[in-house]
Amino acid sequence: MKYAYFPGCAVHASAKEYAMSANAVNKYLDIELVEIPDWNCCGAIDAVYAYNPLLSISLASRNLALAENMKMDIVTLCSACFFTLSRANNML
């Protein structure tokens, strides 16, 4: 199975070990994560959401559109990204 993979900022910065363990599990389960090209921050950071909710939803919506163009369901490892992407998806 293939999924559009949204890594999020934390996975690239401070959660590399988490990504490595997820990749090991994915390999075992025969799941392929295809990183979304040109992804941006999901908008979950407190400053963006607290001061500009529209910007937060817009950032997440762009990532959802990129995944849709890949014709794959989107997955993420980050719980904050999941919340923001899910919230934007429900709003759309």
Image: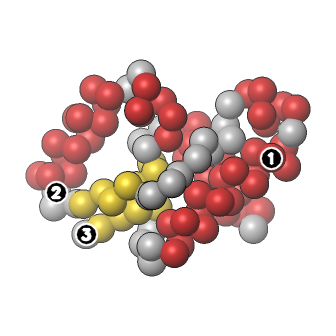
Direction from residue 46 to residue 27 in the image, left or right: left
Q: Residues within 10 Å of mark 2 (few under 14, many from 20)?
A: few
Q: Is residue 3 above or below residue 23?
A: below
Q: Which tag is nearer the camera, tag 2 or tag 3?
A: 3
* Nearer the observer, 40 or 91: 40
Q: Residues within 10 Å of mark 1 (few under 14, many from 20)?
A: some
Question: Disc 1 on helix, strand or loop?
Answer: helix
Residue 75 visible (yes or no): no
In primary-sequence order, the first of circles 2 and 3 is 3
Direction from residue 27 to residue 51 in the image, left or right: right
Name the residue furthest top: 14
Q: Position of residue 65 (x, y in %)?
A: 60, 68
Under mark 2, the amino acid is Leu
- Quickly name the residue at label 3: 1
Q: Is residue 84 above or below residue 1?
A: above
User: Which residue is at a point 51% across and 54% down the rendered structure image?
Assistant: 38
Location of the C terminus by quadrant is: bottom right
User: Which residue is at a point 29% across and 67% down the rendered structure image?
Assistant: 2
Label 1 and label 3: CA atoms lie apart by 32 Å
Q: Is residue 55 above or below residue 65?
A: above
User: Which residue is at a point 45% across and 73% down the rendered structure image?
Assistant: 70
- Quickly name the residue at label 2: 29
Image quadrant assignment for residue 72: bottom left
Label 2 and label 3: CA atoms lie apart by 9 Å
Q: Which tag is nearer the camera, tag 1 or tag 2?
A: 1
Q: Which tag is nearer the camera, tag 1 or tag 3?
A: 1
Q: Position of residue 39 (x, y in %)?
A: 53, 52
